[in-house]
Structures are given as structure tokens and as C-alpha cells.
Image (cartoon, helix red, strand yellow):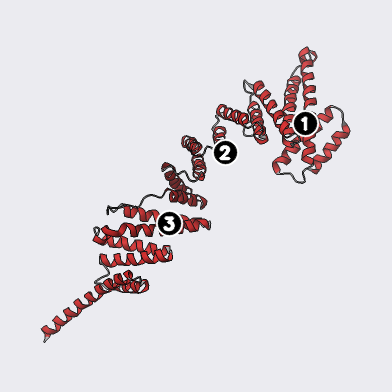
Amino acid sequence: MKKLFVSLLFCSVGFAAVAQRAKVNSADEKLSSNKLDEAKADIEAALQHEKTMNDAKTWYVKGKIYEALATKEKSAADAITAYESFKKALEIDPKLKEAILELQNRMFNVYATVGNAGYGQLNEQKWDSSYAYFKKAFEIQDFYNGKDLGGSIPRDTAMVFYAGYAANQAGNKDAAFEQLKKAAELKFKAEPALYVVLAQLYEERGDNANWIATIDSAKVFFPADKRFNEMEMLYYSKTGKTNELMSMMEKKVQENPDDFGLQLDYAIRLDNLANPRDENGADMPKPDNYDELMNKAETAYKKSLELKADDATANFQLGALYFNRAVAHNKELNSMDSKQQSSAKAKELQTKVEQLMDQSLPFFEKADAGFSAESELEASDKRTYESCLYALQKIYAIKGMNDKVDAVKKKLEAL
């Protein structure tokens, strides 16, 4: 009797294992009939039993069910569950026959669902979660492609770019840099923003060679996008390549003779090159080609005023050019001893000072009129206007125009 009882016990255990395997088959059949909820219930039951919880087919069927749910509901959570299930199945049986035959399409659906969730979060400007989904999509892709199952999921260069973009917007600069660098290596050309952001990241890293190389690539891919010319000028400016910068600017003003902003910027850059200052604003030695630079700057200021005669900043800048030259001659005059003060050289310098002061006056007055007509000035314009008024006050004082000195003083107090 005891022997019979043991046999029956073994039989019941075998029956339970068969029953659980039947659950796996039932789940697979219900999946084929699109009864996804029933299939899900059966496979979860099979995963609770010790005889089927470590079976590769059980996990593979679970992956198929959740892949179908993810595709139907566009659910990234179900897609990730499908991925983890397929991954578990292949850990148990790396050469699972069903996986070799059909896993590529299923894994692609999982990858695409998770990637699309990344795009959805991107559109809502939820940068952190967008990048997290893109990162998970790449993990799924890399996992499948590394399994040598006879297929692969191709790299989506757009997703690589948007992953980098989302990471950058989220403040994750290192992740952004890696993804954007990959997108550039893949020669992604659909979004010029790739090269804008990547160039900025190279600039932040102090990698000047790749900074300018990125700009050069962008100029080839997007020749009509003016941002890359501006970025190239910024590169030349920040790296001290003034000759290249000025050559480029000269070419630009020749190509765009009616661009007021460009003409004024060119004039100011020439002026700054002629009159260098250190980081504290103190004057540095003049360059050897000082006169050449100043003459070019004067011509460019005049050209900008031909385009926009009433512009306050342009009028101030040209007035300041003459005024600063007058100040330089006056310093030279004041450095002379008493005997030299009566020399022909001194008289020549005095004449130049007076002439240059006279030249600067109408431009300062026009700048004064322009700035005072504004209802509200930005901080930078306010500083420029203040400099303009101080210059006017000094010129009026030299000329003995005391009533105008008082009027300017009141404007300065009000400012």
C-alpha cells in the first residue's frame, strides 16, 4: 500500500508540471487568438510555478504577450516588460529556436515603442524622461544586436540626435555630448541644431580643433544657415585669430552692403582692435597698424550711418572715435615740458585736438537726441548714453558753453 501511495504522489507531481506547461501553451494559443488579457493571466500563473518559472519558453511567451500589449496600447511599460522577458528567456537558452526564427521583428516593435515614448516626452518638453526612454531603446537595440541571432535593429540617427538634444535640455551635458557626437559621426543632416549644440559643447570643453571642425561640417551641410557664419566668427574672436576674423567680416560686409547691424559690428571690431584694452579696461599698447585700423573703422561707421542716420549707438561710436583720438593727442601735448609747449609740434597737436573735438560734437549731439527719445533704455544703452553725456559735458566746458554744460549735468543726474 505504501508503495502505491508513493507512485500516486509522483504521478500527481508530474500532472502538476504538465498542467503548468499546458498553461504556457494555453497562453500562447490565446495570444494567437488575440485574447491578450487571458493570455496574460495564464502566463503569469505559469510563472508562479517552480516547474515552469525557469523555463525559457515560459519567459519567451510572456515576452510575446507583452510585446503584443505594448504594440496595441503603445505602452512603453509593457514594451520594457517584454524586453526583460525576452532577455530572461535568452539567458536561460541563448539559442532558443523561436527567438532565432522571429525575435528580430518582435524586438524591433519593443524598441520602437520605447523610442516613440521618448519622442512623446520630447514633444511635451519632459527632457529627463524623454532621455530615459531613448536610453532604454538603445539598450534594447544593443542587447539584441549583440546576441548574434541572425538579424539586427538598425541605428536610427534621428533618435541618436534627439536623445542628445533631450539630455542637453535636461542639463546632462556628458550624456548629451556622447549622443550628439555619435549623431555627427553618422552624418545626421536633418537638424542643424545638432551642429549648433555640439559646437557649443566642444567650445565649453576647450576643444578648439573639434569646435571649428564641427562648424566647418555644418557650413557644408547647411550653407544657407547664417548661424554657422556667426559661430565661426565667435570661434575666431575667442581664439584670438583676429586676422581670420576680420577677413571673414570684411567679406561679409562686402556681400551684404546694406546690412546696418553687420556694418556697425564690423566698425566696432576694427575700433576695438585699434584700441586694445586688458580685462580691467586699461589701455594696452596700440598695434603697428593703428592708423590703418582707425581709418577703416571710420569708413565703416560712416557707412553704417548712411544706412541708418539717426541710430544713437552708431552716432556715439563715430563721435567717440574722433573724441578718443583728440584725448590721445591731448595726452601727448600735456606730456611736453614748458619749452616744448610753445613748439610747432605742440601747436599742431593743439589744432588736431580742437579739430577732432569739433568733428565729434555733432555725432554726440545726435546720439544724445536718439537716446533721450527712448522711453526706456537697456542697461548697455544706458552706459553708452552716460559715456556720451560725459563727453558732451567735457567738450562744452572746453568751448565755454556753460549753459549746455548745466543742461548735460541735469541729464546725467536724471540718468
Q: Position of residue 74 (x, y in %)?
A: 43, 63
Residue 370 picture quarter: top right
Q: Residue furthest right?
A: 403
First along the sequence among labels 1 and 3: 3
255 versus 4 height, above or below? above
- Residue placed under numbered mark 2 in the picture: 226
Image-quadrant location for residue 287: top right
* Circle 2 SS class: loop
Q: Residue furthest bottom?
A: 1
Is disc 3 surrounded by few (<14), some (14 to 19) or many (20+) residues within 10 Å?
Answer: many
Amino acid carrying label 2: it is Lys
Q: Which residue carries the number 1 mark?
A: 363
Q: How many marks?
A: 3
**How packed is label 2: few (under 14 Cα within 10 Å), some, or many (20 or more)?**
few
- Which residue lies under the disc numbered 3? 115
| Residue 307, x across and y down, in percent | 71, 33
Q: CA distance from mark 2 to mark 1?
A: 32 Å
Residue 47 visible? The answer is no
- Locate residue 243, reporting x and y percent: 56, 26
Label at residue 9: none
